[in-house]
Image (cartoon, helix red, strand yellow):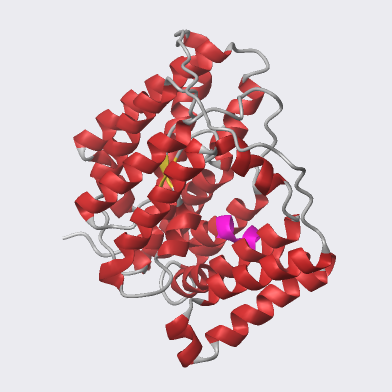
Amino acid sequence: MENRGLFPVSDFASELGGLADVAGRREFEQPRLLGLGQRFWTIPGAVLVGPALGHLSYAEVIGAFIATGVLMLALGLSGWVRRAMEAVPMPIVMGMVAGVFLRFGLDLVFAIRDDFWIAASMAAAFVAIGASRRLTRLVPPLIGALAVGVIVVAVVGRFEAAPQAVALAHPNFYAPAFSWRAMVELVVPLAITVLVVQNGQGITVLRSAGHAPPVDAVAAACGAGSIVTAFVGTVSTCLTGPVNAIISSSGERRRHYTAGIFVGLLALAFGLFAPFFTRLMLATPKAFIAALAGLAMLRVLQTAFAVSFRDRFALGALVTFLVTVADVPILNIGAPFWGLVFGYGASRLLERSDFPARG
């Protein structure tokens, strides 16, 4: 995501995310990752905020972040979020997840096409380790692919980092300003994006891995976290689907939370050394990142497609998938939300027999 000079590289918002991750994960022993901070922006949140900064002051946007946090906190405490999610059939939700994550799988294919030696070597390592039970017990396939990718990038000389001093991040605090214009434009779309789209992905991924995440508690935590982190310039916090998919993809289910704690500690380190790590990532070939993300999402995509089209609500899941992949926002709200709306509507009209009969 391009920074465009709007946010200082030295901001330390991801440190707050790391603290929230470690504390929340140890409390519930669920591998939740709250994606926050200027280095952990969700793509839908960034898309919403980017155009708004063309006609709103940054202080007004910060005020909208705070108001969104208050709304999410209230909805989480009310219990409405859990009831709303339970009303939508799982195949339709997984159709949305498949549509959102499809681009990761496609980017893996494009990476192999555009940068064969890097991406293909990573894919080969992933397959080789995954095909051997003995190797899989020693090292996860994704870690093996990461290691091979780093070696190949170094050998072919594609790492383009310039010599630089290791600088520490420092806090930048922002005073909010509240305006009706910012509230109308940002609060409801941001809340829907976090609670339905982003949290919906994370909750569904965790459930498919055998976990039982506390939906309302997560929503309330996202709201409270959004209020606090808004003062350091952070878009509303959310439950991240892709990272939760990675940290719950292997190992014993009851130990998945330890991977979440480790990721939280990494977020702390990343936040502290944000200027250094940001420039380091920018020096990495795009194919390396695309291949790593695509390999991490393979099992998630497999599960999403299998659940979506296995039995009931298949048409609704298909409509949800197509609308999500089309990625056409309506009323400043992203396509994944509308995918759920249209998919649910299609099932209600054309797959009425798939819904349980009311007593």
Residue located at (46% from left, 17% from top): 173
Compare residues 230 and 156 and report the one nearer the observer: 156
Provide residue 274's location: percent of width, then percent of height.
56, 37
Please indicate whether residue 18 sits to the left or right of residue 100 in the image.
left
Q: Residue furthest left?
A: 359
Q: As displayed, is residue 231 above or below residue 15?
A: above
Provide residue 140's location: percent of width, then percent of height.
48, 76
Q: Is the magenta stretch mostly helix, strand or loop?
A: helix
Where on the picture, by quarter, is residue 230? Answer: top left
Q: As displayed, is residue 11 above or below residue 292?
A: above
Provide residue 225's location: percent of width, then percent of height.
34, 32
Compare residues 310 and 219 and report the one nearer the observer: 219
Please indicate whether residue 334 sits to the left or right of residue 306 in the image.
right
Q: Can residue 96 be seen in this view?
A: yes
Provide residue 125's location: percent of width, then percent of height.
64, 80
Q: As displayed, is residue 65 above or below residue 103?
A: above
Compare residues 95 and 2 and report the one nearer the observer: 2
Residue 96 part of the magenta-drawn span: no
Please indicate whether residue 111 sits to the left or right of residue 46 in the image.
right
* Residue range highlighted in magenta: 99-104
Residue 102 part of the magenta-drawn span: yes
Residue located at (34% from left, 46% from top): 21
Residue located at (66% from left, 39% from top): 1
Please indicate whether residue 63 sits to the left or right of residue 209 in the image.
right
